[in-house]
Image: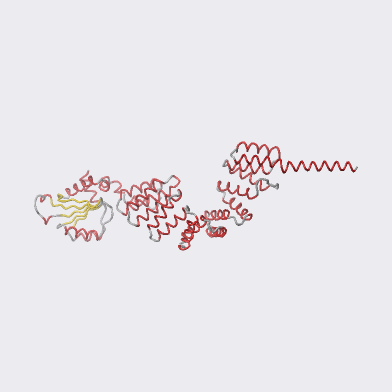
Amino acid sequence: MGLQSLVVAIIVILALFVLTYFKLFRKPKKIQKIWEQIQVGEIRNSIRQLKTMIIKQGGPVDAHFLLAECYRREDNCQMAIVEYRYCLKSKKKLFIATEKDVREGIVYCAKKLGKDDEVLNQLYELIRIDPKNDSYLFEMAKIFYKRGRIEQTVTYLDKTIKVNPAHADALSYLGMIMYHANQIKEAMMYLTKAVKYDPRNYRAYYYLGRLYMDGKDFNKAITYFEAAQRSPYYRIRCYIQKGNCYKEMNEFNNAVEEYKKAISSATAKEQNLLLLARYALADLYESRGKLTEAIEQWESIYRINPNYRDVAKKLEKYQDLRADDNMKDFLVSPLPVFEGICLDIVKYLGYDVVDIKHIKSSVTNIVAVPRASVMRNVRGNRVFIKIYRDAIPLGLSAIKNLMDEAKSMNCSKAICISPIEFREDAKEYAQSRPIDLIGGAQLSRILKEVRG
């Protein structure tokens, strides 16, 4: 009886040994081999092996984890999450991974699928496991920022920095938030630290540029925007902001160039930035009286979004100009052609040109005499004619200066020509003085006569 019991005990011990061996050594060794295959990119073959193993052996938990890893590498994130969740629900212990690995896998896939609630849930658990992991804390902050929950965003950014004071991304996010909250000193502090710890933190460069631009230090702002524009995300924004800086500095050509860079660089995904750049360029053209160019930008915006800002009203305001080809020629023709238009206008008014000077591409000065007197020395009949191409409403100051110029040229009369109507104070001033104002509709009629 004793011998029989001993034999039974030995058999039981051997069975347990064999079971333990297969459970703890043979199976993990096979799993480890498949894991090595996955890591070198043998995904499809690994999936077949894992599915076979799951069917034959009743679903070892490590096989499910590796299957999840395979799906993740194939960007099949939905199926990967299913397998990761199986691992979390299973009571069996993983040999080649930890709970942390599984939850990190779910975070990766849920982010890909845009499932922020799932990401948050897993991050809460990961922070419970590893409360001083700055990556988890920063990810939490970004999700709260995306949802507009600024107070919670700042809380987790602060936690991130407490764990890692040199976390440049967290510092730049805080700087950005402080900038929008008009906390200038705090914003400057965080952003400066961000570029100190990471010289390639383009968000920090961009908002430092915004800070200096708001402070009217445009040259320094441009320097920071040029650093930030290396980032594809900030490139178009930087072109627009540099254009705004040059506009404030009255550097018209540089501003136009930057806005045009933004327009040419914009992709279909950046339509809002494209519209913003076109609108800024149109506004700049309008401020300089370049209405044909401004209308071109407004029309481009209108084709994309008819309801964008006040574009429809702008186009309605300048409807007559848009339909008037003669006026367009007057505004944009090259200088030799424009000079011919000027001579035709002067002739139509009954004068002959004595002298013509193009002060700049948009302003021309002409001294003329009545046609019957062109061959005679009749100084008292000399007329000073100033022709503007920029569609800027001229007021009292401009007309007073014109009268002074006429006197200095020994002209007894002045004529001012503009593509749009004069201001009321200019019209009142001219009523009792030897000056004729020709603008807007009147110029359009004259151009139709001489050009059509």
> Does residue 339 sit above or below 193 in this rendering?
above
Which one is in front, 147 or 244?
A: 244
Residue 122, position in %: x, y? 61, 51
Along the viewing direction, whichever of 369 and 178 lies nearer the viewer: 178
User: Foreground residue, 6 or 340?
Assistant: 6
Q: Give residue 31's quadrant in the image.
A: top right
Which residue is drawn at the image coordinates 58% and 39% (left, top)? 41
Find residue 168 and report its horizontal and vertical position in percent.
Answer: 51, 56
Q: Is residue 157 above or below residue 304?
A: below
Count of all numbered marks drawn on residues in the image? 0
Q: Give the answer, above or below, for where 437 lies relative to 26.
A: below
Which quarter shows the C terminus?
top left
Residue lying at the far left in this picture: please name it. Answer: 376
Q: Is residue 169 left or right of residue 303?
A: right
**Does residue 394 appear to the left or right of 349 in the view shown?**
right
Residue 45: image location, x then y, percent: 62, 36
Q: How is the image coloured?
A: secondary structure
Q: Quadrant of residue 435?
A: bottom left
Front one among 393 and 57 = 57
Please report the residue visible at 8 percent of the width from the left and 51 percent of the height from the top: 376
- Report whether 215 appears left or right of 68: left
Instruction: Point out the image quarter for the N terminus.
Output: top right
The image position of residue 440, as x and y in percent, is 25, 52
